[in-house]
Amino acid sequence: MARRSDRGPAQARAQRDSTRYVGHPSGSRQARTRRSVHPLEVRGWVIGKLPEEIDAELVRRIEHLDQAIRPYRSQLLDAAHALVEQPLRAWGFTDQVPRLPAEAEDPVARTTAASTVAAYWEVHEFRSGYVLPSIQIFGVPWDTPPNVVHVLDLDPDLIRIAMTKAPEFKHLQRVATTPALAFARLFGAAQG
């Protein structure tokens, strides 16, 4: 006979919404339940600050993101070009595929890096037994859903950790030179 839960529907829903099921790191088929930290824990950096202090901190965080990208920037841009060029070539496009305009390079590099940071923290623990909430990479930090944080809400150390450990950065050169990998990355980006 099945045992009935003493929890009410609201408590069960809160538990379900705050828990993610993530594959076990050892590669076994077992799944582990890990709780997500509350978004306010991540956004706590704004508490008690004046608007101009928040603006200054956001500028610092954007500069930190740019600094973290710098070692990978040219490879990111080459990979972004390959993600466009290789499928076009496979579909018979023979003209020269133009490079990104200079004014588009920074946003493309930032968005690619932010996407990689979000993907890294989606599958890695923030601290033992806890993962970060979903991470939004577009828009502004003050316009996120209540259960989501913005990439700029992340402490710069979390961004640095993700960028140094993310497997995507190890494969950037291969994306630029391997059509099949470019297709796989493009398909994955489209699914995301």
Image (tube, rainbow, N blue to C red):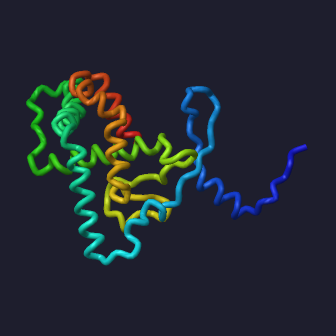
- Using the image, determine if residue 135 lies above or below residue 161: below
Occupied quadrant, residue 32: top right
Q: Nearer the viewer, residue 98 or 181?
A: 181
Q: Position of residue 97 (x, y in %)?
A: 12, 33
Decide if residue 73 is on the left or right side of residue 21. Answer: left
Q: Residue at x 54, y 32 (%)?
A: 25
State the quadrant of the N terminus: top right
Q: Residue at x 30, y 28 (%)?
A: 171
| Residue 130 % position (x, y) | 55, 49
Q: Nearer the viewer, residue 93 or 123?
A: 123
Q: Is residue 32 above or below residue 62?
A: above
- Dividing the picture into quarters, in which one does residue 2 lie? top right
Please state, as top left, top right, bottom left or bottom right, where the C terminus lies in the image. top left
| Residue name at image x 37 percent, y 49 percent | 158
Could you say which is closer to the camera, residue 181 or residue 172?
172
Q: Image point 25% across, 21% down: which residue?
A: 178
Q: Is residue 86 above or below residue 1?
A: above
* Res. 21 image quadrant: top right
In the figure, is residue 105 to the left or right of 40? left
Looking at the rendered structure, the number of numbered marks drawn on it comes to 0
Residue 51 pos. (x, y %): 29, 76
Query: Quick check: 64 above or below 53?
Result: above
For residue 140, side relative to residue 66 (left or right): right
Percent of width and height locating residue 191: 41, 40
